[in-house]
Amino acid sequence: MATRALLAVVTASPPRMIQIKASTFSSSLKFQRHITTIGRCFSSDTNPSVLQPPDVSRLAETARISLTPSEIEECGAKIRQVIDWFGQLQQVDVSSVEPAIRAEMEGGNLREDAPETFENRESIRASIPSFDEVYLKVPKVLNKE
Amino acid sequence: MLSTLQPPRSLTLLPFRRFHGSKTIASLASSSPTLDASFVSPPQSQILTTRRSLLSGETTASEIAKSYLSRIRLTEPQLKCFLHVSENVLKEAQEIDQRISRGEEVGPLAGVVIGVKDNICTEGMPSTAASRILEHYRPPFDATAVKKIKEMGGIVVGKTNMDEFGMGSTTEASAFQVTANPWDLTRVPGGSSGGSAAAVAARQCMVSLGSDTGGSVRQPASFCGVVGLKPTYGRVSRFGLMAYASSLDVIGCFGSTVADAGMLLHAVSGYDRFDSTSSKQDVPEFDTQFLSMDSFESKPLKGVRVGLIRETLEEGVDSGVRSATQEAASHLEALGCVVTEVSLPSFSLGLPAYYVIASSESSSNLSRYDGVRYGNQVMADELNKLYECSRGQGFGGEVKMRILMGTYALSAGYYDAYYKRAQQVRTLIRKDFKAALDHNDILISPAAPSAAYKIGEKKDDPLAMYAGDIMTVNVNLAGLPAIVLPCGLVEGGPSGLPVGLQMIGAAFDEEKLLKVGHIFEQTLKGSGFVPPTLPNVA
């Protein structure tokens, strides 16, 4: 599809913006000043070897999401594809660039640490799946050794 | 010239663009052609027309509301824009009529029929973000944007369909239904605010609210041939907008004209103490500047410097979209603008940076959906199992995927390589935009690399779908305002498919975008982007 070409990081640009550090790549990969091909995007040459590929089962456990075995397989393949594509970010020289938390940094929007009563408590209670007068009921926590 | 393509001469062209003295708005849902073949007037603001008709007594809010409800009933089976239609529409309309008949003041949005995207909280009305995990959830409060609309007399007609939690570009990721594009029922309306865009295009409501994290207002606006307005980050309070990526999310507006989108934006803008990222910047009166075409000078945009982003017209963009954009640039030149090409060198980095940031922030934001305090709960004998099963069964595939990607990108040892790096790329993108906007009043580009594609075409290929966001994500990373307005048609569907032009402005400069957009729209020949007849509309 024509739009696939849009996924590649365009490396044609003034040298000051994007520089390749030679040590990051295997010698077979050359810095090209054209749109890179799809194959190169997904090649493992672009990933620094220190980053392990995603272990989907472990991630699902961390994120508290249960996946069926077929979901793990299907999801896993797609996730690996996308994470590979993220690897393009490694090509950029950001050595002296400050990270931007968000676009505009307007500070000082803090409020008084004073509690306010929310009037519509009934509506909140109505949404709680397991409510036992004052308490939200949940099952026990198992301590994993 | 693509932009002179006339809208289809169907008999059921709705006569809402021109309110002739003798026609009531009740004829909205009926079939009566009011335009003869040679005369196409520029699109009129529905908000202003409604206000005029109500105050002059020409019609009533109840009549207007009835005709829109009837239109919804007629067209929903094909379109599926709405997840919920309000039961209080006629009651609210009657209240407005009573106030008018008592000579009382009514707000500037009195009687205006408004759709609201389902990830924006509306008290007492289901708000599900198109997810099973919130299937029957009714919030105990209104989002600030909704509260403001109601205070001004607007009528929320219903909650519109979307991709689950805002993650998607087609509404195919909705847990409940897929919305069809009114221009071609076999094609997607775009996303994630697909329902809101399609509802305005199909005249099921006058204006609507959506949300834009990576293009979710602008891309569906382009696909559906309506105006989509993304404000500067912080311009509109996010209180009550279910968070997807907190540093990128904004609430945006849809309308059939630039004026309507602008007036709706003005209504919902402003500092809100409940949103610590909302800006204290003044909100200029950009709702009152929409002059009628008769008062335009011959070169009404003389001297306005427009930068066409070179990287958006390269390989991968459909030729039809490219020509429509270039013709739009010529139209701007004819209006007096100085159009030059600009380059944003970091442009292509935006897409991977956006997806890293968005999935990372979403993995954190969606951790609140645990089945304990609200939403669907899957009971289990152990707490972690309750979380895992409630979330595993409540979330759709795309949502789960993005949460897992985000979890990975934020893990110890990976944070620097992905999230921090993406934040640094964000700085580079901000700098590029700032440099370009120091020398230009606005920047322009297509809103998407193609017109609407077929339902199911990109569903199983995440990267192909992500690629379509390339024109829009950088604007979210930089936090800038942007508007998309229809500029032409390309081949496809029964009568062509609309293509939108994106205009990007400097931070908090919505005023300039609206001025340029309004003049562009009013002077575009063959203007009036109305989708063809929907089957079964009488």
Image: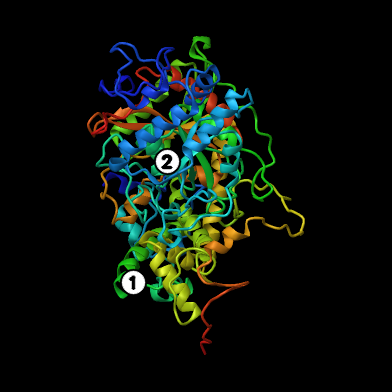
* Viewer-proximal residue among B15 and B480: B15
| Residue plotted at (29% across, 53% down) | B459
Question: In the figure, A129 relative to B445: above or below?
Answer: below
What residue would you read off at disc 1? A72
Q: Are callouts 1 and 2 both on one chain?
A: no
Question: In the figure, B342 relative to B250: above or below?
Answer: above
| Residue plotted at (47% across, 52% down) | B126
* Viewer-proximal residue among B109 and B86: B86
Q: Amino acid at mark 2?
A: Ser
Where residue B497 sits in the image (x, y, percent)?
29, 32
Closer to the camera: disc 1 or disc 2?
2
Where residue B427 sits in the image (x, y, percent)?
57, 49
What residue would you read off at disc 2? B196
| Residue plotted at (32% across, 69% down) | A71
Question: In the figure, B72 relative to A33: above or below?
Answer: above
Q: Amino acid at mark 1?
A: Ile
